[in-house]
Image: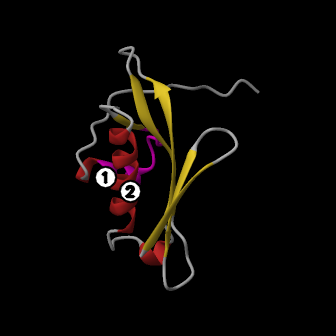
Amino acid sequence: MRRSIRQLPDGRWWIRWYTPDGRHPFVCVSERPHFTGEVDTYIGELVVAKMAQGKGVGRALVRAAEDWGRARGRKRVVVDTGAANAPARQFYAALGYEEEDITVSRAIV
């Protein structure tokens, strides 16, 4: 697969793989401050078609995001996902990611 990387107008970077079937999975990465004071690589979106899941595409995109951060001297990659998104949490855990924050919310309408 061929890969392209380009910067979006808002400063995020978009890494896309070109696949033979015309579905183009992508990951958007940027930087954001970590509570430790360091600046982290941040994965904002990771999109892989259902039919491509489980075939290493998402893993390759995460590794590309990690390489992007490593090239900028970053030591950590951060991803936000919902507590109820068990498949995403399992996916990231399998890649060695550890859960470290809990966000709480309440409807006020």
Cα–Cα gap, marks 2 and 1? 5 Å
Residue topped by disc 1: 90
Residue extending furthest toward the bottom: 21
- Residues in magenta, as a range: 79-92
Give the residue at mark 2: 87
Image position of 5 with respect to 35: above or below = below
Percent coordinates x, y for residue 81 in the rendering: 46, 42
Check residue 88 for magenta coloring: yes
Along the line of sight, the residue nearer the viewer: 107 or 15:
15
Residue shown at the point (31%, 52%) measured from the top left: 90
103 displayed left or right of 76: right
Image quadrant where residue 55 sits: bottom left
List x then y, in percent, for residue 70: 32, 40
Disc sitting over residue 13 in the figure: none
Query: For this rendering, which residue is in front, 6 or 14?
Result: 6
Mark 2 near mark 1, Cβ–Cβ under 8 Å?
yes
Crowd around label 1: few <14 · some 14–19 · many ≥20 (10 Å):
few
Q: What residue type is labelled 1?
A: Gln
